[in-house]
Image (cartoon, grey):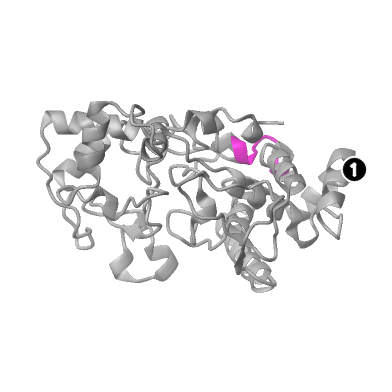
Amino acid sequence: LVCLLTLGLLVLLAFLFSCSSSTDPAPPADNAGIKAPHLFPAVPIPADNPATVAKIELGRRLFYEPRLSLDGTVSCASCHKQEFAFTDAGFPMSRGVGREVGVRNTPTIVNTAYLHSLSMDGRATSLEEQSLRAILNPIEMRADTAVISHILQPDSLYASLFAANFDDIQPSTGHNPVRAIATFMRAVLSGNSRYDRFVLGEKTALSESEQRGKTLFFSERTRCASCHKEPEFTDGKFHNTGLSMHYFDKGRYYATYRDSDVGKFKTPSLRNIAVTAPYMHDGSVSTLEELLEHYNKGGMPNLNRDTLMRPLLLTKQEKTDLLDFLHALTDEQMLNNPAFAKP
């Protein structure tokens, strides 16, 4: 049954997104309500899903709406919690409807507006597609668009919000709920950590240890920034970091079916990483200290391990400095921003 549901999901997704009018990014309107952080470029907005303040508000309500799931118990926010940088920190895998256990650690939605591919294997190419995949996935929300329409149409608040945002006010027509959720997710941005304030000129924002860690992070010796590029602290690409010698979850391979992609997963952003444990695609690394030690040792050997993976031979003090720097990437303002909280 799950296999049939998954096949149906893939067919539906292919149809829906082949019919999209345009996915070319357009500059956000002045009143869009989405303002890029200081060190970031303008937020790309799809031409066929322009951002407005009202649409962000609709998307926020839908993001926290459990009625979008089959049994009315799971919302997007069930697995993407604001206090944990919109991850499900503390759980290697999240649970969907019927307490179904997911297959991968929940990634953050923060700053995903800048990514060209979503999910850890890159199968989704837009936030709209990624949102729909989660809603229809049989082990996540297991929803039915017709049922969503039936539930939302009688709700007067949703009716007014849809009317304010879409020409067709029927909630499911054109998958408007998905478009609204994607717009809210584009608005969830993070760029006000102590690191950002230091770069912008507040030289007391980082301690001496954090400054040493910053220097080490961007050095040719560690080459951390080769994959974790500013300002997002990810290159948005896919790498095999030698987490294991054999990958039961083949990662990027499921999107390309190339043997060279086995074990490759999208580089996660390091922003707010101190609050998002456990780590890696399977949640098998419990702490930030363990994560750093994995890279310090160079990972395990396998055919596709990235050439950047090699022993770093960091001293105890260097490890402390790097860890302190990673903690300085936490954006407390984003974690507590009422604009992102449950309405």
Residue at mark 1:
154
Residue at the image position 75 percent from the left and 55 percent from the top:
176
Locate residue 80 relative to residue 325 in the image: left or right: right
Q: Position of residue 125 (x, y in %)?
A: 53, 63
Residue 318 falls in image quadrant: top left
Bounds of the magenta span?
A: 68-77
Type of amino acid at the residue the image marks with label 1: Pro
Locate residue 115 relative to residue 260 in the image: left or right: right
Q: What secondary structure predominates along the stretch shown in magenta?
A: loop
Q: Is residue 78 visible?
A: yes
Q: Is residue 276 placed above or below 43 in the rendered structure?
A: above
Residue at the image position 40 percent from the left and 32 percent from the top:
194
Q: Is residue 324 magenta?
A: no
Along the line of sight, which residue is nearer the eye, 252 or 273? Answer: 273
Q: Is residue 146 placed above or below 19 in the rendered structure?
A: above
Q: Is residue 1 visible?
A: no
Along the line of sight, which residue is nearer the eye, 282 or 321? Answer: 321
Q: Is residue 75 magenta?
A: yes
